[in-house]
Image: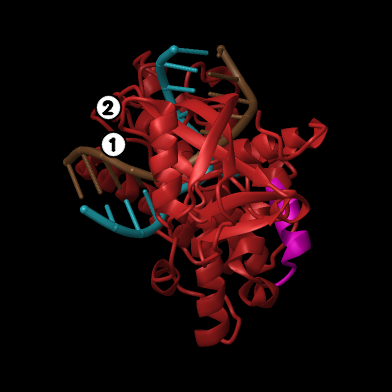
Chain colours: A red, B brown, C cyan
Amino acid sequence: MGGPSPADVRARLLPWYDANRRDLPWRRTRNPYRILVAEYLLQRTRIKSGTPYYERFLKRFPTIRDLAAGPLDDVLAVWEGLGFYGRARNLHAAARVIVEEHRGRIPQSYDALTSLPGIGPYTAGAVASIAFGIRVPAVDGNVTRVIARVFRIREDVTTGTVRRRIAEIAARLVSEDRPGAFNQAMMELGATVCTPLAPACPKCPLERLCLARAAGEERDLPVSSRSRSAPVVPVVFGLVTADERVLVVRRPRGRLLGGLWALPGGERSGRSEKEDLKGSIRSQTGVEVRVGPRWTHVDRTFSHLKWSGSIYRCSPIRRPQETDSVRWIPREEVMRLPLVPFHRDAIKALAGIESFESTR
DNA sequence: AAAGCGGGGAC
DNA sequence: GTCCCAGCTTT
């Protein structure tokens, strides 16, 4: 294959990690449940963003049995604001499988972990190696970058063949004695030294054996295919209120913001905001409304699209009928639901309004 | 293989 | 503004 030997990489990396590792909450425990929770929370999420959610999550769900017993809405409520809400649903489902089929014990093999919802190659490798000391790699974005540089891989790392090649290299590198520490050391190096734009090579324990550094290409690797800019999608939502109540709908699972409660409305296709809003509220809730004044604008960027549009205050013609996915509930109670974050803001702003039901 | 799925920090 | 983050699932 070529490139530095696994023994050399380990001999340099592990002492560096022992001396430089950050004190992170999930590194203070050997509890597999706590490690599992951290891995779900941190999928495609920066440590700085995920840490406060980790603390909050474990306070609300101290054990896997607490999590399995809790309603999904409570899990989503803790998750609200973090994004990728399918993770919350998957973690909740995984907890129920573990309690019902594994007697509440986190499965102690890579394959059994992979079979759980929301656990793929990375998360299975991380939990297996960190919580159970099993010698398997854990290849995340950091590890991909470190390996692409150290082994000077100049092909597009987003393709399947190159990803497999990097996984094979990672599998050979993993320490036999300390697989969990080794995997975390690779991630730590990528996060703090071998950073995307300006790697701090003089501080890197692998500088002497890094092929990209030797070629002066460290800033050019890894190569990844360009991400296209997110298209703008027009949206409109209705803040339907009367009698101190708000109309909310459950967004469909698996879709954007899936599982969260939201103001009725969404992506629009007609010629006017108000006409589209009346139609979407009717189809989603069966409620006929009078559309009032514009309440606020919407300008929100997601991973693959941008929502741009408005939220209007509305009045229902008749009292809404509640279903599993439609609620017509008091303002104080709606705030306890897991809500689309910017919809929570829009509802909260009603607090300062003198007459709640006036939409004139 | 490609698309869908959040939000925010760093530059 | 762009890039990318302790990725996985569905199509």
Quadrant in the picture for the N terminus of chain A = top left
* Residue situated in front as seen by the camera: C3 or A216: C3
Distance of label 2 from label 1 (alpha carbons): 7 Å
**Subunit that carries the residue with mark 2:** A
Q: Could you say which is closer to the camera, residue A38 or residue A29?
A: A38
Task: Name the residue located 67 percent from the left edge and 78 percent from the top edge.
Answer: A65
Please state which of residues A290 and A209 is positioned toward the viewer in this rendering: A290
Confirm whether the magenta stretch covers residue A114.
no
Rendering coords of residue A57 (x, y %): 70, 57
Q: Secondary structure at mark 2?
A: loop
- The range drawn in magenta is A53-63
Residue A2 visible? The answer is yes
Q: Where in the figure is residue A202, as x and y percent of width and height? A: 57, 18
- Mark linked to residue A225: 2
Comes first in the chain, label 2 or label 1: 1
Q: Type of residue at label 1?
A: Thr
Q: Residues within 10 Å of mark 1 (few under 14, many from 20)?
A: some
Up-down: is A305 above or below B11? below
Q: Is residue A246 above or below residue A98?
A: above
Residue A139 makes an appearance in the image? no
Who is closer to the viewer here, A270 or A261?
A270
Asked whether residue A59 is drawn in magenta, I would say yes
Q: Look at label 2 and name its amino acid.
A: Ser
Q: Are marks 2 and 1 on the same chain?
A: yes
Residue at the (61%, 82%) spot, across then down: A104
The answer to whether marks 2 and 1 mark residues whose Cβ atoms lie closer than 8 Å is yes
Question: Label 1: which residue?
Answer: A158
Q: Residue A330 in the image: x percent, y percent?
A: 73, 54
Q: Residues within 10 Å of mark 2 (few under 14, many from 20)?
A: few
Which quadrant holds the C terminus of chain A? top right
Q: Chain of mark 1?
A: A
